[in-house]
Amino acid sequence: MATARASASVNTSAKVVAVNITDEVRRALRAAALRQGIAVVSAPHTTCSVCVNEDEAGLKDDLTRMAALLTAAVEPQGGFRHDRIDNNARAHLTAVLVGSSATVPIVDGELALGTWQSVFLLEMDGPRTRTVTMTFLGD
């Protein structure tokens, strides 16, 4: 089984934003030259996530709203303890709920995404420059 690794920098433009990174993952997969296997896309950060979903403007807005709603629904009385350090507990907690990586099958040298699926970096504490790592396993 062959393995390949790649990384890409992603500049985010807002505090909370969904950035489509599918093209970056496809470019890295072409360079890896694997035909069958899996792609693991990961964000080595604690205040952003990687997910697979539809690239539709309303849905991207809903993703950012969901990030705020998920943590707002569970905020304890008196606030989050981590906010005493740097006021970004919501970003950390949302990243835990969404997850830091996504796995996508590789079939015939392509990402086996559904018709409407794309790979996203979901920023929750921007704007920042983020790193996305990609690990490809297969033949």
Image (cartoon, helix red, strand yellow):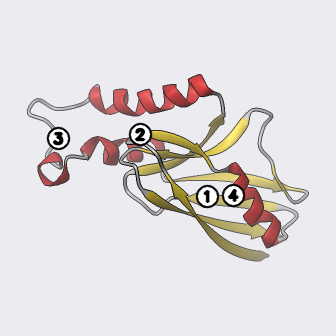
| The label number, if any, that marks residue 21 in the structure image | none
Image coordinates of residue 102 in percent, x first then y, are 60, 51
**Residue extending furthest top?**
58
Q: Disc 2 marks which amino acid? A: Val
Image coordinates of residue 123 in percent, x first then y, are 45, 46
**Dot placed on the residue nearer the N-terminal end, 4 or 2:** 2
Q: Give the crowd class for mark 4: few <14, some 14-19, many >=20 residues within 10 Å.
A: some
Q: What separation in Å lies between label 4 and label 2 (alpha carbons)?
A: 20 Å
Q: Residue at x 41, y 60 (%)?
A: 45
The answer to whether the residue labelled 2 contacts the one labelled 3, judged by CB atoms less than 8 Å apart, is: no
Which of 128 and 78 lies nearest the eye of the viewer?
128
**Residue extending furthest right?**
108
Q: Disc 3 marks which amino acid? A: Phe
Residue bearing mark 1: 41
Residue bearing mark 3: 80
Residue bearing mark 4: 24
**Dot placed on the residue nearer the N-terminal end, 1 or 2:** 2
Q: On screen, 66 above or below 11?
A: above
Q: What separation in Å lies between label 3 and label 4 (alpha carbons)?
A: 35 Å
**Residue extending furthest front?**
13
Q: Give the crowd class for mark 2: few <14, some 14-19, many >=20 residues within 10 Å.
A: many
Q: Residue at x 21, y 31 (%)?
A: 75
Which of 90 and 17 lies nearest the eye of the viewer?
17
Q: Residue at x 71, y 37 (%)?
A: 117
**Dot placed on the residue nearer the N-terminal end, 1 or 4:** 4
Residue bearing mark 2: 16
Q: What separation in Å lies between label 1 and label 2 (alpha carbons)?
A: 20 Å
| Secondary structure under the numbered disc 2 in the rendered image | loop
